[in-house]
């Protein structure tokens, strides 16, 4: 299966088998960003990305460079050059992107932890599609040195794993000394109700009720007035910066890029700096709204996807059912985790908190995971 662009030899008995998205430098291995054009001229990376220092010190074994949506500029995970990672829940469904291979690697047990990047949902969306846990970290918490950029002001690195405990382990690899010991779970969670299919809302509400009862916590309905405006602003900035990053590549090799990626870059080329500036102004309004909300609730709870992952022949629809990018705009952490539902597929619960609240998100997620089993 095309989960990995390149598998790597590794010693047996390593404490952690680590898969690394092929947008993150691994010493001695070319970084392709999932692009045939870039792969053809890619030299071996002279060193590891800074975010791998903790993994090396902990003795983690890098088992391979994982596949992704080309240039990390897409949410379906479909890659015509290296193949599309197979969704382990149903091979007819998209794996989600852009960190498709990282999600599939941990879902199939080929890695204990995977590293991905999240610029507009790229860890959380494939986690939701494949039934695993994916964390978007606080902007700036994990170094981006040695990580190929997409939209630098939104890019983040974070872990994926089959269970919450694996993401805790992943954060300790990214940030030596990271621990959730002694961290209190959320006392109050704000339930945000965005349009979603009934089975998803039912699954999330049931899981939160079970957790709140066991933890002695409260779940209260919370409204995010600026969500839609924040979504538009985030995607404007993402597209504007993606053009700054990859516009030259599109001009020289546009016909050799994935059709969807080439089209997105073409559309991005028409964005003006004034539009990006207006989007950042909207982003400041959004950050102020979230700050006010987090004064009354510890975390927010909402879906990652409003419906089941689409089939491969309807992959573009995934962009219409995702709830992710506003948290990138605000720079705050957010986690996707699977929740058992009345259908054959899990629902995706997203927990988001203020900047630097990864520990509380993970402790709370672990409690939800345990209570909802």
Image (tube, rainbow, N blue to C red):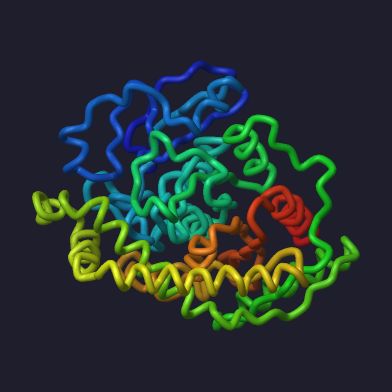
Q: Which residue is drawn at 43% across and 51% down?
A: 155
Residue 343 appears left or right of 267: right
Work out whether residue 169 or residue 271 is closer to the camera in this orientation and state it: 271
Closest to the observer, 100 or 26: 26
Q: Which residue is drawn at 23% across and 27% down?
A: 43
Q: Where is residue 184 in the image (x, y as percent from the top left)?
A: 83, 52
Compared to residue 100, the image places residue 129 above or below, namely: below
In percent of the image, x 16 and y 49: which residue is there? 249
How many labels sit on residues? 0
Residue 367 in which image quadrant: bottom right
Percent x, y of residue 370: 78, 54
Along the horizontal axis of the image, is 9 left or right of 81? Answer: right
Residue 140 sits above or below residue 272 on the image: above
- What residue is rendered at 51% in x and 70% in y? 323
Q: Nearer the viewer, residue 18 or 292?
A: 292
> In x, y percent, where is residue 64?
41, 31
Name the quadrant of the N terminus.
top left
Q: Is 86 drawn above or below residue 55 in the view shown?
A: below
Identify the image quadrant of residue 243: bottom left
* Residue 310 in view here: no
Q: Tell me: 255 left or right of 14.
A: left
Q: Residue furthest top?
A: 11
Task: Return the x and y of residue 9 as percentages of the image width and height.
Answer: 41, 20
Residue 158 visible to the viewer: yes
């Amino acid at each position: 299966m095309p989960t990995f662009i390149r598998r790597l030899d590794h010693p047996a008995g390593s404490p952690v088998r680590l898969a690394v998205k092929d947008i993150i430098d691994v010493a001695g291995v070319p970084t392709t960003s999932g692009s045939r054009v870039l792969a053809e001229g890619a030299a071996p990376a002279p060193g590891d990305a800074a975010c791998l220092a903790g993994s090396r010190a902990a003795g983690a074994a890098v088992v391979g460079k994982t596949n992704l949506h080309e240039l990390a500029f897409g949410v379906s995970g479909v890659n015509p050059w290296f193949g599309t990672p197979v969704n382990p829940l149903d091979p007819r469904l998209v794996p989600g992107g852009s960190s498709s291979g990282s999600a599939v690697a941990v879902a199939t047990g080929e890695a204990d932890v995977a590293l991905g990047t999240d610029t507009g949902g790229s860890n959380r969306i494939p986690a939701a599609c494949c039934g695993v846990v994916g964390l978007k970290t606080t902007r700036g918490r994990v170094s981006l040195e040695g990580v190929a950029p997409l939209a630098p002001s939104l890019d983040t690195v974070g872990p994926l794993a089959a269970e919450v405990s694996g993401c805790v382990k992943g954060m300790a690899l990214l940030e030596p000394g990271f621990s959730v010991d002694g961290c209190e779970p959320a006392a109050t969670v704000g339930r945000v109700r965005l349009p979603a299919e009934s089975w998803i809302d039912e699954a999330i509400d049931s899981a939160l009720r079970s957790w709140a009862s066991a933890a002695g916590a409260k779940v209260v309905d919370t409204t995010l007035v600026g969500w839609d405006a924040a979504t538009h602003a985030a995607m404007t900035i993402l597209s504007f910066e993606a053009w700054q990053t990859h516009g030259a590549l599109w001009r020289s090799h546009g016909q050799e890029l994935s059709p969807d990626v080439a089209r997105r870059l073409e559309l991005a080329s028409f964005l003006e700096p004034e539009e990006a500036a207006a989007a950042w102004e909207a982003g400041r309004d959004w950050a102020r709204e979230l700050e006010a909300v987090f004064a009354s609730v510890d975390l927010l709870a909402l879906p990652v996807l409003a419906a089941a992952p689409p089939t491969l022949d309807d992959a573009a629809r995934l962009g219409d059912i995702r709830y992710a990018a506003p948290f990138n705009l605000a720079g705050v952490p957010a986690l996707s985790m699977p929740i058992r539902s009345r259908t054959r597929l899990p629902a995706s619960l997203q927990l988001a908190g203020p900047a630097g609240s990864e520990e509380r998100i993970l402790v709370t997620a672990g409690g939800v995971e345990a209570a909802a089993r």
